[in-house]
Image (tube, helix red, strand yellow):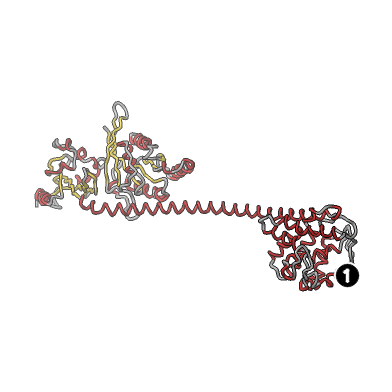
Amino acid sequence: MITKKVVLIGDFATGKTSLIRRYVDNQFSDEYLTTIGVKISKKTLQISDEIELQLMVWDIEGHTDVKATNPAYVIGAHGVILVGDITREKSIENIPLHLELVKRLLKKVPIVIALNKSDLLPNEIEIEIEKKVLDLDASLPEVLKVFDTSAKSSKNVEAIFITLSQALLL
Amino acid sequence: MHIQEIFNAIYEKHYYEYIVLDKTLNCIEFSDKVIDYVDIQEASQMYRNIIKLIPELVGLEDELQEIAQGSREGIEIPLVHRKKAFVTISIQAGRKSRYDEIESIIVLFENVSQFVQMQQKSIQDRNDKELLLLELDKKNSSLEKYNKHMMHLVEAEIEKNSRLTNEIIVTQREVIATMGAIGETRSKETGDHVLRVGEYAKTLALMAGLSEQEAEELKMASPMHDIGKVGIEDAILNKPGKLTATEFEVMKEHALLGYEMLSGSKQKLLQTAATIAYEHHEKWDGTGYPRGLKGEDIHIYGRITAIVDVFDALGHDRVYKKAWPLESILDFIKKESGTHFDPSLVKLFLDNIHVFISIQEHYKSDKKYHKV
């Protein structure tokens, strides 16, 4: 079995815990309970008959103005998911800041971006969502792909982890 | 002090648990309750690699090797959530003294649950507050957008209403002028008479000190002063020459008829027109009709219209008479001051006769006016 460490980094209340909970346990809760420190969840993927991939998913305390992401949690990661809240402009503006931390601490590792909570935006601004995704994609060439996700509706949750897992095995 | 003694000292404080590793990172010794923090199945076997016991160390293989080789001081992973508790995991080299060779690697678990419990509420409150502020910002921004949108709608609506109001005013004016002209046309007189009367009336009203709004209202309403004539039979209305006493009595009814036609409306303008129709044949000395009102009991609109109506009517041909020369008209008006007409209005009229003549010139549609 191949074991890989994946960390989710982003501003507080962007839905990192919810994305993990949706992916690992297929559960969701609207209640916001701030994450303190770090909690690790395991998810095993059967890649092929011979290959089993175990993801050690690190749910890290979110970045705030008074407390930045602790580098000790990021060191040793094999893959990174940067998370922003699509309804909170500042959390998206901070993604390049999180990316800088990743580049400083890790050698070339696969990175994907989740613009979460897309369920909170009305359908009519679907174009706006796509624009945000494309803009971010274009501005950060180090990033494999940008997804608009919803832990609530499950939209693209599996996709971010699958995309990252495939890259981890290359 | 031997490293074992240090462990014993730490262990007595009850906050710490530990695992001792050999330099190949295999477990060789555990404290009693360390089982609370590691994978039980893996820990039940001796000489297991530490990474099997502590998933947080996956990915840190190189760093652990560096610690074993002495090229890295240590690693600390703070506030790790573990079975409803929070621990800080520290990994460092174990030596008898700083000058001795590394004997082992020590993994220390410090239970920091109490510290986290103390911190948790304040962090949660701070984040909740921050989210609330962000939410408020978002709402404010939505409200601002909504307000702007509403302002645009209101402005568009005001503009539309203002356009409609103007259209209504213009239409009203045209309808009134047309109604007045109908009355005049029935008596075979030109429609321009009513327009000129309106213009004179407004001019004299302003001279008499009425407001612009009142003067404009008079201008719009006065063309209907003879609307009651539509109810007078043609034989009397268009009779050439002088009317008999009986015919004149019938003719006088046009004032009341006009009033009755117009006074049913709730519109201020039509009520004003009703007053003018009713009172423009009243005389200052009380000998007029239909009610024999006297002096200032006659509405000023009626008194003004009386002068300008006579001024214009005398200056033009009618079925029963030829147009008078201006001098005769002015003499007549002067003579009737204080009997037929309000003397103060007559004075204003005559003092400014050039203004009224220029208005008359402006219309000129009736070429039958006789200049002296």
Given residues B296 and A41, the one toward you in this image is B296
Mark 1 surroundings: few (<14), some (14-19) or many (≥20) residues within 10 A: few
The residue at which mark 1 appears reads as B327
Chain to which the residue tagged by mark 1 belongs: B
Residue A131 image offset from top left, x and y in percent: 48, 43
> Going by the image, does B97 lie left or right of B216?
left
Given residues B14 and A106, the one toward you in this image is B14
> Going by the image, does B352 lie left or right of B170?
right
Residue B56 found in image quarter: top left
The C terminus of chain A lies in which quarter of the figure? top left
Residue B119 image offset from top left, x and y in percent: 25, 53
> Going by the image, does B337 lie left or right of B30?
right
Residue B154 image offset from top left, x and y in percent: 57, 53
> Going by the image, does A81 lie left or right of B290?
left
Residue B45 found in image quarter: top left
The N terminus of chain A lies in which quarter of the figure? top left
Query: Which residue is outermost to the top?
Result: A49
Count of residue discs = 1
B256 shown above or below B91: below
* Amino acid on which disc 1 is placed: Glu
Q: Identify the residue at horizontal 13%, vertical 40% (top origin).
A: B28
Given residues A113 and B214, the one toward you in this image is B214
* Residue A93 visible in rendering: yes
Question: Dot 1: what SS?
Answer: helix
Q: Identify the residue at horizontal 26%, vertical 52% (top origin).
A: B120
Given residues B197 and B272, the one toward you in this image is B272
A97 shown above or below B368: above
* Residue B200 visible in rendering: no
Residue B190 image offset from top left, x and y in percent: 84, 56
Q: Identify the residue at horizontal 81%, vertical 56% (top origin).
A: B184
